Amino acid sequence: MTTNSPSKVHVTTTINGQQHELLVPPYMSLLDTLRELIGLTGTKEGCLDGNCGACTVSVDGRIVDSCLVLGAEVNGKNVNTVEGMATPEGLHPLQQAFLEEAALQCGICTPGFLVAAKGLLDNEPSPSEGRIRHWLAGNLCRCTGYDKIVRAVQKAID
């Protein structure tokens, strides 16, 4: 990471498998970097203080709230967002299960739940219901309740 000017930091990062070179204001969050500089608006703004999980992304395989990470901190790292889940062949099994189980309503929390659930399944292919609930505890939903979300994650396992 090198500073090109006092107001911007040069960042090279891989987002959803695609390399990006950016000039990021040092105070800009990863959330705003993704939305404003890259144009990936799937990651949602919720609370801006790390309590709701709407902005959950994966950085080098670690689940983080992108509102709490600076865009400059992802220099040399791999970032995965909800946009990186689907392929040209179709939706990721978690996305399909969320649709089939009606595990979404307004959609603000859904990207964060999807990325967090994918992080769980990438690390634990067959988690128990209790483990799913524990893993997703950092993501809040004000519309659906959590049973449909948990059922959708369980369905994606099968």
Image: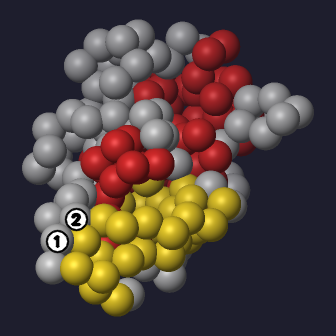
Can the viewer see residue 22 in this picture? yes
Indicate whether 96 appears above or below 84.
above
Q: Which residue is mark 2?
A: 25
* In the foreground, 84 or 102: 84
- Residue 45 in the image, given as x and y percentages of width and height: 26, 36
Q: Secondary structure at mark 1?
A: loop
- In this rendering, the count of numbered labels is 2
- Residue 116 in the image, given as x and y percentages of width and height: 46, 49
Mark 1 burial class by Cα count in 10 Å: few <14, some 14-19, many 20+? few
Residue under the image location 39 percent in, 49 percent down: 37
Q: Which residue is mark 1?
A: 7
Q: Secondary structure at mark 2?
A: loop
Identify which amino acid the numbered label 1 is placed on: Ser
Q: Quadrant of the C terminus?
A: top right
Identify which amino acid the numbered label 2 is placed on: Pro
Residue under the image location 36 percent in, 67 percent down: 23
Indicate whether 151 appears above or below 102.
below
Residue under the image location 84 percent in, 35 percent down: 88
Q: Are marks 2 and 1 in contact (CB under 8 Å)?
A: yes
Mark 2 burial class by Cα count in 10 Å: few <14, some 14-19, many 20+? some
- Residue 9 in the image, given as x and y percentages of width and height: 29, 76
Mark 2 or mark 1, whichever is nearer to me: 1
